[in-house]
Every structure is written in structure tokens, then in C-alpha cells.
Amino acid sequence: MSETKISKLFTELNQLKWSVVSKGVIVGLFAGFVVALYRLGIEFATEKSIEIYEFLKHNQEYIIVWIVVIVVVGLLIAWLIKCSPESKGSGIPQVEGVVLMGMKMRSFFIIPVRFIAGILSAFFGVSLGREGPSIQIGACGGDIIASKLSHNKLEENYLITAGASAGLAAAFNAPLSGIIFALEEIHRSFSPNILLAATTAALTADVVSKTIFGLKPVLSYVDIPALPLSQYGWLLLLGILTGVVGALVNKFVLVSSKVYDVLPAWSRPMVALLLALPFGLFLPQVLGGGQNLVQLSETAQMTVGVLFVVFIAKLFFTTSSFGSGIPGGIFMPILSMGAIVGSIFAQTLSGFGIPASSIAILCICSMAGVMAGSVKAPITSILLMAEMTGSLVHLLPVAAVAFIALLTSDLLGIHPIYEVLLERLVDKDHVNKKHDNIVLEIVVEMGSDVAGKKVSEVNWPTGTLIAGIRRGQKEYVPNGDFIIYHGDYLIVLSSEHELETMNTCLNKLCRKN
């Protein structure tokens, strides 16, 4: 490339940050409103499912009619998934595929399918959350806005990430968690432009969400006293336990998916809805995402024996629902299982000095631990708990459990659940790749293969063109002798047919192994 073209590229990148701020507000408004509607629909349908099962329990002659309804709706959901396979499951792996691998996302199909299939499924009480789909709906909003207002492929990528951030912010009333989730899980790297886009979109979406739902956190906790220092020793054991549970969740999800793969695609949603029937009749506490289970766990309204049964049921119900491919996420079910584990832990060890007043805080710590062990996004887990409780008083014990759980999960050889699901998605080729030229912006991490080396010393993937390097506020056009330091941002031009391979190889080179 000529110096003039490179200079123009840097100028466009510098102007990009103000562009993504203004467009991030529009993305936040769109995502916040659409996700709020989706959230209202899911909450209404879940409440109705409890009423339906209560009616069926006392009027068993109608169960046959309900089974017929299950068959019809199951076939309809299967048809919707066939029409829009990108709408299957959580939606988070699909968003990661778009951002990291240049896959195609048919946003105008995904949003209506998410609404129809997701809300229909919720009427049967399936154990799925709204957060994953909300993230994809938000990302679709970013994609739609970008297609209308942006002609820069890098900016489109940022706005999709911003939409995902706005989706989580609106689903949980948790803007900080949405911002960090976009960096930690969706984009998997830090960039000032991504941060600006995600922040403006998430804060805007949060304003929309709070206007509709009020200022009250999604999970309303009672007043929680700080954990006494004398109890901190138990955090090590709780961290190990939640790390194991997070690993167990991942294993069950993958096994369930493989079992469903044996069945014809048209029958999978139907089977999942049929499996929901006995749970709705005999254990309605496990219906839906599990927000009610969090509240029951932290107030110790169930004994250890009952909690254990509920945990096993929730684990099986969640994995059987999610493995079918029904549009819905596992974010909230994972948190609810974490709360149950925390309550079991606290009540079991009450004879060893854990007071009843500590049950709630240990539930919060356990929620962060199970999520960190499964999703492998500890910072998001910690911030989410802070925003749910509305206090930073519990930050230290929550962080301790989250990182111990992460370490435990790593030692068990568990990979992040969304990363594994993305690999399965790519293997099945359910999502088409884009065929556009794109600029990649990749940060160099400390300890990576690239840090501290000259450009000429790096074994770059074939076709790599390092157009520039940004270091702080300065920009450089590197030659072979230019030394790359950690913290540098590589500006790379990718050809259309090498995008996925190049992005994967560059991330391996620039990240610490």
C-alpha cells in the first residue's frame, strides 16, 4: 500500500471513534426497545405456563389436548428454525462467529423468529433464559443500523458488538456487565473503539429498559450483610465446588446436544416440549429461566434435600431444553443453578459456623462461580453480581469464588461453553461466511508470540498485510525491523476468502497461550 492510502486509513480509524459513539446511541435505542418487548413477551409467557400446568394438574383430562398442542407448536418451531438456522439455541455463539470469523447474520429473519419461537417455547415453561437471545437480537439491531448508516466494515463489526452489549444491558438492567461481556466474551479483546461503541449502546439501552421496567434490579435481593472475615476460608471450598458444577453444566449441555443430533431435526423441539410436561406438573419451581429459584435459594425457603432434587431436575431440564436447539439461552439457568448450589453449601455447613445470615451472600458468590466455571467470563460474572445486588460491598468474596472456580474449571480441561458451541456451529456450517474485504484490528497481549519481536521475525499467515500499528496515540507504518510491543494494535487488511483463517491465526499469534 502507498503511504497516502495508509495515511488515509489511519485518518478514517481516528474518525471512527466519534462515528461509533453517535451510531452507538441509535443502536442502543433500537436494541433497548426491541429487547424490552422480547423480555415482556417471555415474562408473560412464562407466567402463563405456570398457570397452565396448575390447571392441567387439577384437570388431567386436558393433558391429551395439551400434548396435541405440543406436537403442533413443536413442528412450527422446527420449521422456524429451518427457515432461520442462525436463530437456533442461545445466539451468543452466532454473534461471536459474525464478529470473530466474518460469518453472515440475516438479521431481518433472526429477530422475528426469535420473537415467535422464543415466546411460544416460553408458554411451555422450558428451562431457557432470555439473555442469550437478547444479546443476538441486540447484535442484529447493530447489524441493521450499520447496514443503513455505515460503509466501513470495521465499524459494522463494532456496531454489532455494541448491539450485543446493549442486548445484555436491556435484558438484565446491567449496563456495565453488557459492556464488559462485549469485550471479554463477544470480541475477546480490548479496543478503545469497541469500548466507546459498547458503552454508548449499553447505557442508552439501559435507559430504555429502566424507563419500561423501572429502576429495580432484575434479581431483587433482601438486605445482605457483608460476609464476616472469619468465613472467608469457606470461599476456597465454594470456588472449587462451583468450578466443578460449571464444568458439569458444560458436559451435560454437550452430551444433550449429541443425543438430540440422533433425532430428526423436525422432532427435536417437540421432544423438548414434551419433556417439560412432567416438570410442569410435578416440579413447577424449575420452569422458566430460574429467577424464582434464585430468590427461593437466597432466603433458604427449601431444605437441603429439596434443593438437591431441584438442582438435579434443573440441570437435566435445562440441558434437555437447550440441547434441542429451541431458541433460548442458558445464561439465567446457569445463574439459578449457582444460587441453588450456594444455598446447599451454606445450609450443609451451618453446623460448622456458617450463620443463616451468610446464605444470601454465598448464593451470590456461587452464582458468579458457576458462571465463571462454565462461560469463562469472570469479570462479567463479578460485575453482574454487583449490579444485581446494587452494592460493591461483596466484591471481594464474589471475585475470589469466581477466579477459584475459573481455575478449577481450567484444571478440569473445560473449554468455555460458547466457544465450544461456536466450534460445533462452524463444523455443521449452519452459518454462511461473509465475502467482503475487511480491516482487522487486533491487540497484542503480553506474553504472546508476537510481543517483543520484529515484524520480519514473526511467522505471519499467508496473505497477511500489516497496514499499520497503533501505539497509544501514535500510528506507525511498520517495516521488517519494526519491533512489536504488547499493547500495540495491529491494523491488518484481510482478503475476502482468507478472513476466517487469518483472523484465527492472528489471534493465536497475538494472544497469550
Image (tube, grey):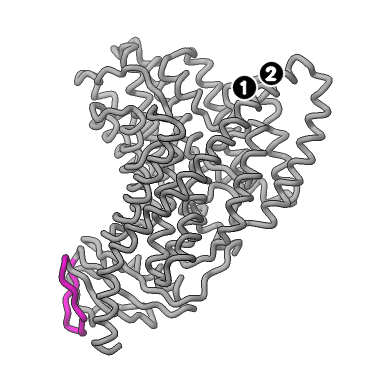
**Inter-mark Cα distance, 1 to 2:** 9 Å
Where residue 372 sits, quadrant-wise, is: top left
Q: Magenta segment, which residues?
A: 472-485
Of circles 1 and 2, the one toward us is 2
Tell me the chief SS of the magenta region: loop
Where residue 8 sits, quadrant-wise, is: bottom left
Q: Position of residue 254 (x, y in %)?
A: 56, 46
Res. 466 mark = none
At label 1, the amino acid type is Pro
Q: Is residue 125 above or below residue 196?
A: above
Q: Residue at x 69, y 18 (%)?
A: 54
Quarter occupied by the C terminus: bottom left
Q: Is residue 499 above or below residue 479?
A: above
Res. 54 mark = 2
Mark 1 or mark 2: which comes first in sequence? 2
Which residue lies most toward the bottom here?
Answer: 2
**Is residue 363 on the magenta stretch?**
no
Answer whether residue 346 is visible to the viewer in this image.
yes
Q: Which class describes the residues within 10 Å of circle 1: few (<14), some (14-19), or many (20+)?
A: some
Q: Is residue 403 left or right of residue 29?
A: left
Res. 284 mark = 1
Q: Could you say whether the residue bearing mark 1 is in a helix, strand or loop? A: helix
Disc 1, disc 2: CB below 8 Å?
A: yes
Q: Nearer the viewer, residue 503 or 439?
A: 439
Q: Position of residue 262 (x, y in %)?
A: 70, 50
At label 2, the amino acid type is Glu
